[in-house]
Amino acid sequence: MPATILVGGFFGDEGKGKIVAYLSKHDSPEIVARGGVGPNAGHTIVIEGKKYGLRMVPSGFVCESARLYIGAGVLVDPGVLREEIRSLKLQGRVGVDRRCSIIEAEHIEADRKDRHLSDKIGSTGTGCGYANAARVLRKARQAKDVKELEELQLLCDVPQEINDALDREKGVLIEGTQGFGISLLYGTYPFVTSKDTTASQMALDVGIGPTRVDDVIVVFKSFPTRVGEGPFDTQMTEEKANELHIEEYGTVTGRKRRIGEWDGKMAAYSAMINGATMIALSGLDRLDPACRGAKEYDELSKTVKEFVAKVEHDTRVPVKLISTGPEISEIVDLRDEE
Ligand code: GTP
Ligand code: IMP
Ligand code: MG
């Protein structure tokens, strides 16, 4: 491991939650820390048939020994966080940086009422845009100002915890949210989220400098999806998606996701700006349903192997993780092979 950042290479929902859960279970990092915008993200994890939808807590919760942190760059909705900690029984394992900005009820209301955001951009209505605006205007409350977070003993200094763990040569996994195409800086502006979404931003969000990052894993799905408005160069017709039996709905909003073909040009550009050292591919069972659940490279079909080779050719980055289904165990891990 030591310091590994994982980010989305397309428009979000690439399956980061599943990959982070697998890596956490397999590598047992001391810390899993979340960067990214806030509870506009929704990670879905399936373990032994049980489905979890997470918006605030890192997907690394599946590794029982891991400490779970929320970095200072992330927006916190105290109600959403409290409920996740309660329902997943994570008391004592979660830390929130004192400097996280808080999403207030008025931010959510304003987000939902704002016709530009809700209709033109297709915002998730979770208050993130208004909360980030309040932070920039220096009107936001911070986590340290919220009594409930203090009472729940969640407040801490995330950069200190992470840098100390790295000094002790412990594994730290940094979980990004959203995806490259909806980055405020590099995405399809104005059809983007309210912050950058690349690996450099994730390092900043949790408080590690660029020289401390060992690996950047960029996750791509075999058929990219986009939820909300904005350009999508390789989008396919609904008929074609139906023929391929691909149908996805947003974890947070329940909206139907638009489905597209592999976009090699976007993948290459995204891998470049993220500084990818390896790629994780998801949804290979969609390319060839016979590969569902495969755990070994040799179990993959010619179609899937050729697709993996194409991704490596397009991006010039090795594909090291190949997800063959939503369950965290459904994955081919090539990291130890040369
Ligand atoms: P954001 O942080 O919101 O960008 O989400 P995410 O990247 O964690 O992805 P999300 O869980 O929202 O969406 C991915 C969907 O694909 C979920 O429903 C997963 O259960 C599912 N999924 C993940 N990997 C695979 C895979 O290899 N095959 C199939 N069929 N589904 C997968
Ligand atoms: P906002 O971040 O809620 O303001 O939404 C802005 C745009 O980003 C909309 O098109 C959303 O659909 C999209 N978006 C925000 N978060 C996610 C995510 O986690 N996955 C996919 N799309 C997202
Ligand atoms: Mg999602």
Image (spheres, grey):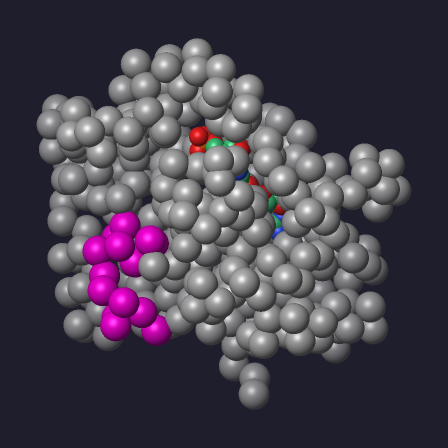
- Identify which residue is drawn at 39% across, 59% down: 199
Vertical comparison of 168 with 123: above or below:
below
Q: Is residue 298 left or right of residue 92?
A: right
Q: Position of residue 150 (x, y in %)?
A: 13, 31
Vertical comparison of 1 with 8: above or below:
below
- How many circles with numbers are drawn on the protein? 0
Q: Position of residue 176 (x, y in %)?
A: 41, 51
- Identify which residue is drawn at 38% across, 36% down: 194
Q: Is residue 169 left or right of residue 145?
A: right
Front residue of this view, candidates 126 and 274? 274
- Identify which residue is drawn at 21% across, 38% down: 100
* Residue 90, image quadrant: top left
Residue 242 visible? The answer is no
Q: Which residues are magenta?
A: 201-214
- Identify which residue is drawn at 81% across, 38% down: 237
Q: Position of residue 295 (x, y in %)?
A: 66, 68
Q: Is residue 59 left or right of residue 171?
A: right
Q: Quadrant of the C terminus?
A: bottom right
The verdict on residue 81 being magenta is no
Q: Quadrant of the N terminus?
A: bottom left
* Residue 161, image quadrant: bottom left
Q: Main secondary structure of the magenta part?
A: helix
Vertical comparison of 110 with 167: above or below:
above
Q: Position of residue 116 (x, y in %)?
A: 48, 20
Q: Is residue 127 left or right of residue 271?
A: left
Front residue of this view, candidates 154 and 268? 268
Residue 270 visible? The answer is yes
The verdict on residue 207 being magenta is yes
